Amino acid sequence: ASTSPCGEMPATEKDLAEDAPWKKIQQNTFTRWCNEHLKCVHKCMLDLQKDLADGLRLIALLEVLSQKNMYRKYHARPNFRQMKLENVSVALEFLERQHIRLVSIGECGIWVWGVWGRVRCSTTNSLTLLIDGT
């Protein structure tokens, strides 16, 4: 097998598969982290892709983490695809106004691992969010 210029082996199809073990671990860790923060507003996530699709849990998570309200109204009961997309746009606009840069946006959705200041992993595999003004 050939190696990359950095001397690393190329990613295998197994590592890139949707059900790759490392992806499941990341999804589970991130879901638990979200739920830890969302429990104070009596919300939870079971499936990231489905639960973030209408924008409501993303908005709730951003409001909890920032301790601020969204800058504009959003649809509390989005029944149509357009309403769901508008909610996600409200959340993305909020991030932009807070000068927060997204780490990654992929075809499976938005991954917000390091969006607020610095994120650090503790020994309990939970993520601690440190918000700074920079």
Image (cartoon, helix red, strand yellow):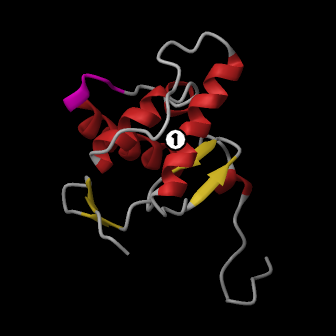
Q: Residue furthest front?
A: 72
Q: Secondary structure at mark 1?
A: helix
Q: Is residue 20 shown to the viewer in this render? A: no
Which x, y percent locates residue 110? 58, 46
Query: Which residue in the protein does label 1 denote?
Result: 91
x and y, in percent, of residue 51 in the image: 49, 26
The percent position of residue 12, horizontal first and vertical second, equals: 71, 61
Q: Residue 43 magenta-drawn?
A: yes
Q: Residue at x 41, y 25 (%)?
A: 46
Q: Nearer the viewer, residue 34 or 89?
A: 89
Q: Is residue 61 left or right of residue 115?
A: left
Identity, as a three-letter code, of the amino acid under mark 1:
Ala
- Seen in the picture, residue 59 relative to 56 is either above or below; the reply is below
Residue occupying image coordinates x 43% and y 47%: 25
Residue 68: x and y in percent read: 31, 44
Magenta part of the chain: 40-44
Q: Quadrant of the N terminus?
A: bottom right
Does residue 44 sit above or below 35 in this rendering? above
Q: Is residue 38 visible?
A: yes
Give the answer, above or below, for where 68 lies relative to 132: above
Q: Please tell me which residue is depicted at 46% across the width and 41% down the height of the picture.
A: 71
State left or right for residue 36 relative to residue 79: left
Pick the front one: 76 or 112: 76
Side of 55 relative to 14 (left or right)? left
132 w.r.t. 41: above or below = below
Q: Is 132 one of the magenta-colored residues?
A: no
Q: How many marks?
A: 1
